[in-house]
Amino acid sequence: MRSAISSQGSALRLFATVVALALMVFLLGQQGWDEILGAVGRIQLSRFLLALALMFFSRFFVIGRWHVLLKSGGVDATLNQSARITFAGLFANNFLPSTVGGDVARLGGALLMGFDAAVSAASLVADRVVGLVGMLLATPIGLQKLFEIKDASVWVAPLMAAAGTTDGRSWLGRMAHRAKKLISRIGKALTLWWQQPGAVLLSLGFTLLHMAALFTAIDVLLRGLGETLSFFQIAGLWSLVYVITLLPFTINALGLQEVSIGFAFSQLGGADPINSLVLALLIRTLFMLASLPGALFLSDFLPGVAKAQPILKRLDN
């Protein structure tokens, strides 16, 4: 029964991914391909390389966040090991199907390194929780922009369409279910760290540095496109995009992330729709490029993936 439900969920996500990607292509076509290419051409190579460097910095702060949690949980991991495993997970997130996602690849790597399975799995969930908490700090800014829209249908309709409902009840039900599940996961994951607030705060500090590097990279790209948004506006808008892409509508947020960025930065941030869509494509490109070092390590950790999947499933339940 569970297998059938899982297969049905995978099929729905695949369908939603195709729909989201088709919508993205439609929106790009509506703006005009010549205009899109013209906007891309306005980005100086030096700006793109600076944004890429900032994206790499953000990845290293992500490595630091998880490394702190591992070490404080009693895992004797070196920074080099944490970096290799994290990059492998980032590569899996960007280039492999969702069945071999980043957390599965990271846990597989941890198991092959001989790390404690229970602590490693819990640290991955704690890592996600700390990352989410960091982003939620900026969410009120994004929500303020969202509720400034006078015509509620501008943002309610897309949410209802994404959820496949017209009255909102199904969407709210899904959100309530995921919130309940998230609270349960937080309790399980942070058990080891309740007595180590210093480690959690240090991990959160790495998250804030990661966010600062990411938002600065976005600012560099926006200025290259001729758009000027404040750092805090970018933080608020991206936090909304981040929360939306946590919803398991599409595989690895393909299409969903790009459409969300296009909507947030144009409708809420006031940027030109063309520039917002170009920004979405550039961010996806930067994410992929910054994860490429993981290709050097992922093959070493794939044998541990089969062991990692049931462990993470048990932690979720």
Image (cartoon, rainbow, N blue to C red):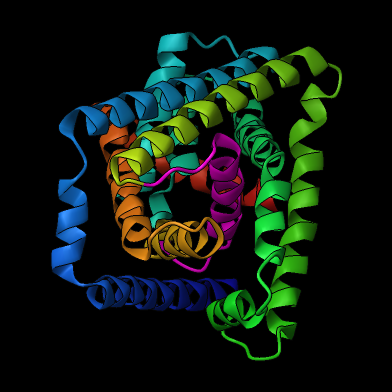
What number of labels is visible? Answer: 0
Q: Position of residue 313 (x, y in %)?
A: 60, 51
The span shown in magenta is: 227-251
Q: Residue at x 33, y 48 (%)?
A: 284
Q: Position of residue 309 (x, y in %)?
A: 51, 47
Quadrant of image for the N terminus: bottom right
Asked which quadrant contains residue 113, the reply is top left
Q: Is residue 261 visible?
A: yes
Viewer-side residue, 131 vs 116: 131
Asked which quadrant contains residue 204, the reply is top right
Viewer-side residue, 18 vs 115: 18
Q: Is residue 249 magenta?
A: yes
Q: Residue at x 37, y 21 (%)?
A: 84
Asked which quadrant contains residue 160, the reply is bottom right
194 on left or right of 153 = right
Q: Main secondary structure of the magenta part?
A: helix
Q: Residue at x 47, y 10 (%)?
A: 79
88 on left or right of 307 = left
Quadrant of image for the C terminus: bottom right
Q: Is residue 307 visible?
A: no
Viewer-side residue, 174 vs 264: 264
Q: Position of residue 187 (x, y in %)?
A: 82, 40
Q: Is residue 240 magenta?
A: yes
Relative height, residue 227 to residue 202 (above, below): below
146 on left or right of 266 = right
Relative height, residue 293 to residue 237 (above, below): above
Q: Residue at x 65, y 70 (%)?
A: 149
113 on left or right of 239 = left
Residue extending furthest bottom? 166
Relative height, residue 42 to residue 201 (above, below): below
Q: Position of residue 104 (x, y in %)?
A: 47, 42
